Structure formats: C-alpha cells, structure tokens
Amino acid sequence: MTGGAVLRVAAHVFLGAGQAPGTSEPETRGDEEPETERPVRRPPRPMVTVAVLLLAGCLAAGSVPALARGADGAARAFTDHAGYAAAALDGRAVARPGTEAWWSWSGAGLGLLSAALAAGLAAAAVRGVLPRALPLAPLRRLHSGHVGDYVAWTAAGIGLLAGLVLWPGG
C-alpha cells in the first residue's frame, strides 16, 4: 500500500497524471511573491533526471547480485574503522568478513510481485478506479495535513510501541 501511494504521488508530481487537487487557497498569500514567473506545468529536467537515476540505481542494486555484493563490501570497508586504522597506520591489511547469501529466486519473485502490485494500485488510484471495498475515506480523514495531527499520531505510536515492549513478559 505504501509503495502504491508513493508511486501515485510520483506519477502526479513528475508525470502530471491524475486529477489536479481542487484547492481554494491561492498559491501565495499577502505580499509573498510567486516563486516562478509563470505556472510550472512539468518539473524541471534535473529534478526528473535525479529521480530516474536513483530509481535505476535501486533497481540495479536489487537485481544484480554482483553489484549488490560490491556495494556491500564497500560499505563494510567504509565503516570498518579498526581495519582502516590498521591499513593506514600499520600498513597491514585486515581480513574482512564475507558477505552472506542474500539473493534468492523466491526473494526476487516476491520483490517483483510486490512492485507489480504497488504499480497496479498506483495506476488504479491515478485513474480513479479503486474498488469501493477499500476503506479509504477513514484513512483520508486521518491524514488532515496538519503537522500537529502527525505529531500526535507519532507520539501515540511511540507510546503504543513502548507499552508493548515494556509489557510484563513481553
């Protein structure tokens, strides 16, 4: 559901897909000056390019095992302070632990299935053809857009989590 929601927002922001939200508030208030001289229809190319490159990097790291192993090895070497100090100060190499087997066909299949479901949910949301069985109205009422409401929900979630962790026997 989260993936579908993020993809729906990305389709709306980057591709202009879906209906434009109806707002009665002006973009600027009082003596604020508009940020652009004319309305912006599409996001600037650098903004889209960065998003596409990040998405391509994530897809490559998730689907090419050798690339992921290389990135994992580089991250381990980067965070191995003792190994770096030994190599820099003493001139000796420190053996690094090997990487675990993390890639499997079932994991890749489940990843592709969840990506397909998220894309389908996003497409249905953009087109406005979500099934009526989905309980979206109560969820939309919870997302008011007010920062105070999100702070209250975060505090409630942290309190619930702390209560579960501190529960006797838990």
Image (tube, rainbow, N blue to C red):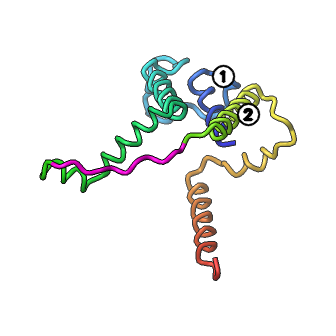
Choose the circle earlier in sequence order: 2 or 1.
1
| Amino acid bearing label 1 | Ala
Quadrant position of the C terminus in the picture: bottom right
Residue 166 percent across, percent down from the top left = 59, 77
Tell me the chief SS of the magenta region.
loop
Q: Is residue 75 left or right of residue 92?
A: right
Which image quadrant for residue 125? top right
Tell me which segment is drawn in magenta. Answer: 92-102
- Residue at point 61% right, 63% down? 157
- Residue at point 67% right, 26% down? 20
Residue 149 percent across, percent down from the top left = 61, 56
Q: Is residue 107 left or right of residue 40?
A: right
Numbered disc 1: secondary structure: loop
Mark 2 Cα shell of 10 Å, populated few (<14), some (14-19), many (≥20): many
Task: Tell me if residue 108 is in the magenta stretch.
Answer: no
Labels 2, 1: front one: 2
The circle drawn on residue 121 is 2
